Amino acid sequence: MQPASAATQALRQDLRLYETAPARDGAPSWAIQDPVLNRFYRIGWLEYECLLRWPGDPAQIAADIASTTPLAVDVAQVEEFARFLEQHQLLMASGAALQRMVQKAREPGWRDWRWWLHHYLFIRVPLVRPERFLVRLARALDPLFSMPALLALLLASLLGMVLVARQWDSFAHSVMDILTPSGITGFLIALVVSKTLHELGHALVATRLGVRVAHMGVALLVMWPMLYTDTGESWRLRSNRQRLAISVAGVGVEMGLAGLATLAWALLDDGSLRQAALYLATTGWVLSLALNVSPFMRFDGYFILSDLLDFPNLHERAGAHAKTWLRRQVLGVEDAYPEHLPPRARRALVVFALVTWCYRAVVFLGIAWAVYAFFFKALGIFLMLVELTWFLAKPVWSELKVWRERWREVRRPRRSGLLALLLLAGGLLLFPWRFDVTAGGVAHAQRQQFVFAPLPTQLAELHPAGRVEAGAVLARFESPDLAAREQLAQASVDALERRLAGLLEISGGREKALATEQRLQEQLAELRAVREEAGRLRITAEFGGQWRDVDWLRRPGTWVGVKVPLGVLTDTDGWLVDAYVGEREVHRIASGAQASFLPEGGLRALNAEVIAVDSTRVRRLAHPMLDSRHGGGFSTLVDDQQGTAPSEALYRVRLRLHEAPPQGKELRGQARIEGGARSLVWDGLRSALAVLVRESGF
């Protein structure tokens, strides 16, 4: 259809036109409402003048506007506006357009599998029309919208945060309980309550400002239910501050609820009510700040930023500027920007669009993984590929098609440079590069001797900290019970030896001597056992080294238990590092590879060498300081049989340090190990194929 013919078609009779707030430059603005789809289209002065003269010949419309208004207009602008109206189905359909609409109406819609393929990621299901209920509720809650109520809420939230800060350890410990099954259930219930009040906040503020809330319902985002409120008619408001109030209302309600819940947690005693307050507080603070405030997705943060800047369709307009900027910078074509803006504003839009694209790429990759994880394998892989193709590959491919069509417009030198750059990038991706592998680990002495009391006993002697030689007495203990048992056993041995000697000299004593001899052997065994156990009360150095971590409060004569560490002897001549590497990286490490170890908080890395790589995954962390619960970098799961087991597959890589750490003691740090050469393209393809084959069950 020719663009000129669209201008001769009449407008739909059900459309509504509202005057809205002036544009940023002070020009008047209007909004066209499509009541069928409940959509609003913001137009300027030129488009308004076109509507006053619609329908008609584009040349006549342009000439009449130019002669009766101060606007400078040409036929191309009128035709472009006509295409806009036709594209959004705001004209009375006829001819081919009517046939397309009829054909689309005859489509099976949600009953067809193709509809679900394109819409399963986001589906809106209207549930209620709450206009009357909201009017009554807004009147009842009118005191809550006053300035004193707002100040009271802010003071209560601030008081709650101060009280929680004073007992932060208890709060953090309670947050960890959310990871239990009951905690997750409570968190989901709190999420439903918080999001329901969030949407009511939007709806109530819109109702107070005279905006009709058409309906409220549930939106399915990747089959995950989310509440939503239709406040599309807020574009009828002339004040962007009023639209901003509607956008902020949801986050404001969640923040207020989180503040009151924080105060409640600080004041309540332990119990179910306090735990419920914790769930509401964490739901409001974490999810609202992490998701709703982000302006890079079409959540509240996006609409808040649009209203603050009074810049409708921020994503679309920023994206259009960024595409034009890329074409100008890469292809060198002199395309005009979609709209005239100051250079500073245009640069800000381009940067915002680039950041939005990167942010969305990460989010869509996460959604792709979620789609794969939530469905059975075959369907999950299929839907993941559809999602990656539809949201990531398709936009990129569409833009590349435009570049290909306009390739002839690129000057020859730039064309040669782009091809050379493309070949260079491909070569760099295919070339096998060496990449280091980083892993958390612990540096410790090659030989260590930890000293504990062998049994609950009394300390008699404790060697002072410092350098000791092999065989030196590190600790000596006394046990009155063992001494008494030794004396008793020795007395019994002496008595039995004397009796045995007397029996051998009398007539008929040989028969009794056999029984006495047996008892004597029993007492001798008892005496040897007691003396061996007493020998454990004297602990000597197994090798020469540094005797450290001696508890100077342990004086001779004090009683100690078997779990009380008295000191550790370390061999300062050899130091090792136990580093733990993930399953995807361990195959790139070989014995003899160069490495380094940077102690935590240190300024200089220590040179090292790989001496061993385990072939089987570790069942538990040998060093508790690596556990995330103790500040380490590895998350663990509690196992009744093996203690704390790593939550991911880890392999131990042992390094030999070429020099001792400056602190001369066991410490945590980060190891950097030389990895085998790999091509980024080949490595990525191999990993993707491995995952595809493994997860699909081929």
Image: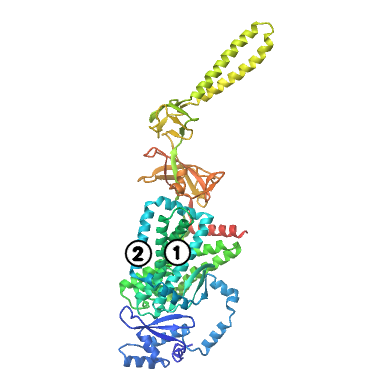
Q: Position of residue 19 (x, y in %)?
A: 37, 84
Q: Is residue 567 left or right of residue 223?
A: left
For the C terminus, the quadrant is: bottom right
Q: Position of residue 289 (x, y in %)?
A: 41, 63
Choose top left, top right, bottom left or bottom right for residue 490.
top right
Q: Nearer the viewer, mark 1 or mark 2?
A: 2
Q: Position of residue 40 (x, y in %)?
A: 43, 80
Choose top left, top right, bottom left or bottom right for residue 353.
bottom left
Q: Are marks 1 and 2 in contact (CB under 8 Å)?
A: no
336 vs 546, nearest the viewer: 546
Q: CA distance from mark 1 to mark 2?
A: 64 Å
- Above or below, 363 against 243 in this view is above
Secondary structure of residue under mark 2:
helix
- Above or below, 440 against 47 in this view is above
532 vs 691, nearest the viewer: 532
Residue 434 visible at all: no
Q: Amino acid at mark 2?
A: Ala
Residue 500 visible at all: yes
The colour scheme is: rainbow
* Disc 2 packing (10 Å; few <14; some 14–19; many ≥20): few
* Disc 1 packing (10 Å; few <14; some 14–19; many ≥20): few
In the picture of the structure, the residue carrying the numbered disc 2 is: 152
- Of the image marks 1 and 2, the number of the one nearer the N terminus: 2
Q: Which mark is residue 423?
A: 1
